[in-house]
């Protein structure tokens, strides 16, 4: 699940965000309002929240079996829960809510430009943080699985 979320965030950061520079302020606000509505779906929530649940569960499942696997997974869990889930819910979502309540029709061109600037600067900063931390969390999960394989291989050799 961390791989799905980190892939989504990475793809957004390297393709969607650069594409937004081609849009006017009005087009950008419309696009982000539409994206912020579309992302609220069960498939996204399963992967996004699933990682919050399953990373720590996986860590504690391996606690007695492999201390190295446990350490990698618990670190991945902390990074994901604080750096991805926490940043998203505490910082990106409130910005999204603020943008959702913004009316282009009742705003001046100056207000629209100011909204885009304040929203995009803050949102992109926190999106970069959660993107990097989700990728690190995913990589740590992969390392954990390789460390577990190494433990199992050593156990077989010792038998």
Image (cartoon, rainbow, N blue to C red):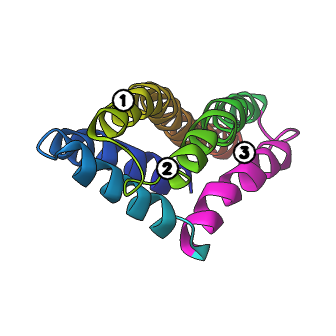
Q: Which mark is residue 102?
A: 2
Element under disc 1:
helix
In the image, taking residue 143 as reference, residue 109 lies left or right, namely left
Q: Which sits in the foreground, 41 or 108?
A: 108
Q: Quadrant of residue 21?
A: top left
Element under disc 2:
loop
Q: CA distance from mark 1 to mark 2?
A: 11 Å
Asked if 92 appears above or below 36 in the picture, the reply is above
Mark 2, other Cα within 10 Å: few <14 / some 14–19 / many ≥20: some
Q: CA distance from mark 1 to mark 3?
A: 68 Å
Q: Which sits in the foreground, 36 or 147?
A: 36
Q: CA distance from mark 2 to mark 3?
A: 66 Å
Which span of residues is magenta-colored?
43-66
Q: Which sits in the foreground, 133 or 138?
A: 133
Outermost residue toward the left in this view? 22
In the image, taking residue 82 as reference, residue 147 lies left or right, namely left
Q: In the rendered image, which quarter contains the N terminus?
A: bottom right
Ranked by sequence position, the earlier of labels 1 and 2 is 2
Q: Which mark is residue 159?
A: 3
Outermost residue toward the bottom in this view? 42
In the image, taking residue 23 as reference, residue 116 lies left or right, namely right
Ranked by sequence position, the earlier of labels 2 and 3 is 2
Mark 1 and mark 2 in contact? Answer it, CB < 8 Å. no
Tag in front: 1 or 3:
1
Picture residue at 52% right of the left edge, 33% below the top: 130
Q: Which sits in the foreground, 16 or 68?
A: 16
Asked if 13 appears above or below 45 in the picture, the reply is above
Residue underneath mark 1: 114
Q: Which mark is residue 7?
A: none
């Amino acid at each position: 699940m961390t791989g799905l979320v980190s892939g989504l965030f990475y793809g957004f950061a390297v393709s969607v965000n650069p594409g937004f520079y081609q849009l006017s302020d009005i087009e950008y606000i419309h696009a982000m309002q539409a994206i912020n509505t579309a992302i609220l779906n069960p498939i996204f929530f399963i992967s996004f929240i699933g990682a919050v649940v399953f990373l720590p569960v996986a860590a504690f499942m391996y606690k007695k079996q492999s201390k190295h696997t446990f350490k990698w997974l618990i670190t991945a869990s902390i990074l994901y829960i604080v750096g991805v889930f926490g940043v998203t819910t505490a910082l990106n979502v409130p910005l999204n809510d603020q943008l959702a309540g913004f009316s282009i029709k009742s705003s001046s061109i100056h207000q629209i430009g100011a909204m885009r600037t304040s929203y995009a600067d803050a949102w992109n900063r926190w999106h970069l943080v959660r993107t990097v931390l989700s990728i690190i969390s995913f990589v740590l999960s992969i390392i954990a699985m390789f460390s577990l394989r190494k433990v199992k291989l050593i156990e077989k050799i010792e038998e």
